[in-house]
Amino acid sequence: MKLYTIRRRNAWKNASELETTASISARVGSEEMPNKVRWIRSYVVKEEDGTLGTVCIYQAVNLQAIREHAARVGMPANEITEVVNTVIIRDDPLTDAQAA
């Protein structure tokens, strides 16, 4: 499998909508497409208009599998880019919510 970043812009009005979509996404990936896509992690970002977007890291057999997964879930995949290398300087820091 190859590694991809996926930018999902202005996709959710609030955290509740995002959580619902995340649950569906995890189920679709694990139950319907386990040999095609694997969700690794996502960074939730606040868009300029106040909506939420994400930058997601996925493994997939190809770009089409990423697009198929997004379509099955009903979420955007505005920009999909193959990752060619990873450089880790520091582990992701804990957010205030994670530390609590």
Image (spheres, rainbow, N blue to C red):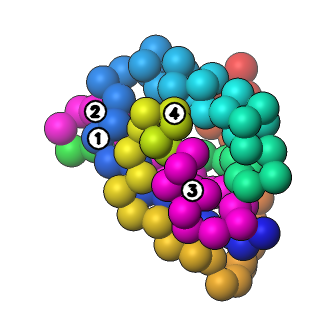
Q: Residue at x 54, y 63 (%)?
A: 64
- Residue type, numbered disc 1: Asn
Tell me if I can see residue 39 in this picture: yes
Residue at the bottom extreme of this rendering: 84
Q: Say what secondary structure mark 4 lies in.
A: helix
* Dot 4 alpha-carbon crowd within 10 angstroms: few under 14, some 14 to 19, many 20 or more: some
Q: Is residue 12 left or right of residue 90?
A: left
- The residues bearing labels 1 and 3 have C-alpha atoms spaced at a distance of 18 Å
Q: Please determine whether, in this image, residue 14 is positioned above or below residue 5.
A: above
- Name the residue tied to disc 1: 10
- Residue 99, horizontal then vertical, whole percent: 73, 28
Secondary structure of the residue carrying numbered label 2: loop
Mark 4 lies on residue: 73
Residue 25: name its quadrant: top right
**Picture layout, residue 37 above or below residue 18:** below
Return the residue at label 3.
66
Q: Earlier in the sequence, mark 1 or mark 4?
A: 1
Q: Which mark is residue 51?
A: 2
- Tell me the amino acid under the disc marked 3: Ile
Which residue in the rendered view is the most extreme toward the left?
Answer: 49
Callout 1: 10 Å neighbours few (<14), some, many (20+)?
A: some
